[in-house]
Amino acid sequence: MNVAVLGAGAFGTALAISLANKEPVTLWARDIGEMANERVNARRLPGGAFPENLSITDVCARACEAKVILIAVPMQKLRAFLIANQALLQGKTLVACCKGIELETGLGPVGVISQSVPDAVPAVLTGPSFATDIAAGLPTALTLACADDDICRTLQSTLTTDNLRLYRSTDTAGAELGGAMKNIIAIACGAAIGAGLGESARAALMTRGFAEMQRLAIYRNALPTTLAGLSGFGDLTLTCTSEKSRNYCLGLSLGRGIPFDATTTVEGAATALAVDALAREAGLDLPITTAVAALLERRIDVTQAMESLLTRPLKEE
Ligand SMILES: NC(=O)C1=CN([C@@H]2O[C@H](COP(=O)(O)OP(=O)(O)OC[C@H]3O[C@@H](n4cnc5c(N)ncnc54)[C@H](O)[C@@H]3O)[C@@H](O)[C@H]2O)C=CC1
Ligand SMILES: O=C(CO)COP(=O)(O)O
């Protein structure tokens, strides 16, 4: 099946490289720069050489001739991108590869696709995977979610490669919540480690953060079991423990009180504010998310964030 990837950031490029080792893939970039000549995305993924089967274009219409389209633009840019290219995307299967919740609406990628391109079939590809690992051919296991089980099975076999092992699910809400929420918790963990609060504090944040992920999942009619899989627990584990994670690194710099490059894609920053607003609206208790949102908005510092969590009323686990 013909596949295209829209968005040539680190992740889109890595997915295109892995898929092109199996079948022809078109990668669309807003600005292809020297990528066509150099056969590498030097800015976003240096070291990931393009296989022969990977063609790169800045003509979106050309890429959208493919039947299956992976979309790897940042979450807060997704809606504008879809609307701008709506006519090209109609009737396609659109696999969202971004992790986050839209700030203005509280929707995940599936909701945004459904509103912006109503006759497309939305799916989600998510789970623990650094772009650099995928591009290097290292083994990764991901969750592929689509509400239509037949389409999901076809997609699963199309998008599985030598180093991408995909597990399928029909629980799109659960899959996208795991990928979105783990970034918030990774910021909290980075902040704790950066401030010297220790690895025991990180373990506590990961575990109680996982409880928040399940709470939000239940509220949104997602399956808690999905959160226990690759898209939730799996990605939480990776992102909260690795300095390869941009979300974790943002947290580290908050904890250390040093500046962070504002041009870096850090999905957890907007998503923390989106989920905090959702929690207030729904009356949900998500204290770590609330603390991360306050930390990001500089309403509190790391010491106050930790204090706010440690002085909460005692409760049953
Ligand atoms: N980098 C990684 O290891 C992984 C990233 N992801 C997810 O993939 C998504 C993209 O992240 P990265 O590729 O890492 O980011 P990146 O920062 O490497 O690249 C973002 C790309 O999006 C493009 N872009 C931005 N605004 C756009 C717009 N309005 N229209 C079209 N293109 C636009 C940029 O030109 C750039 O190529 C995020 O949601 C991230 O959470 C998921 C798994 C792993
Ligand atoms: O989602 C990721 C790994 O699964 C990448 O994490 P960051 O966006 O924090 O770099």
Image (cartoon, helix red, strand yellow):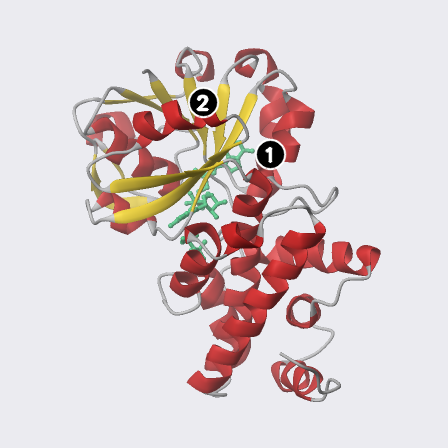
Q: Is residue 170 above or below residue 5?
A: below
Question: Quick one: label 2, few (<14), some, or many (20+) residues within 10 Å?
Answer: few
Q: Secondary structure at mark 1?
A: helix
The answer to which quarter of the image holds residue 166 is top left
Q: Amino acid at mark 2?
A: Asp
Which residue is located at x 39 percent, y 34 percent?
A: 8
Q: Is residue 82 above or below residue 284?
A: above
Decide which of 269, 118 is in the foreground and name it. Answer: 118
Q: Which residue is mark 1?
A: 110
The quarter of the rendered structure image containing the C terminus is: bottom right
Depth-wise, is mark 2 or mark 1 nearer the camera?
Answer: 2
Residue 144: x %, y % from top left: 43, 37
Residue 169: x %, y % from top left: 47, 38
Q: Which residue is mark 2?
A: 150
Which residue is located at x 45 percent, y 60 percent?
A: 233
Q: Is residue 184 above or below residue 27?
A: below
Decide which of 155, 280 is in the foreground and name it. Answer: 155
- Looking at marks 2 and 1 on the same chain, the residue that comes earlier in the sequence is marked by 1
Task: Give me the disc on residue 189.
Answer: none
Q: CA distance from mark 2 to mark 1?
A: 18 Å
Residue 267: x %, y % from top left: 54, 52
Which residue is located at x 55 percent, y 65 percent?
A: 210
Q: Secondary structure at mark 2?
A: helix
The answer to which quarter of the image holds residue 17 is top left
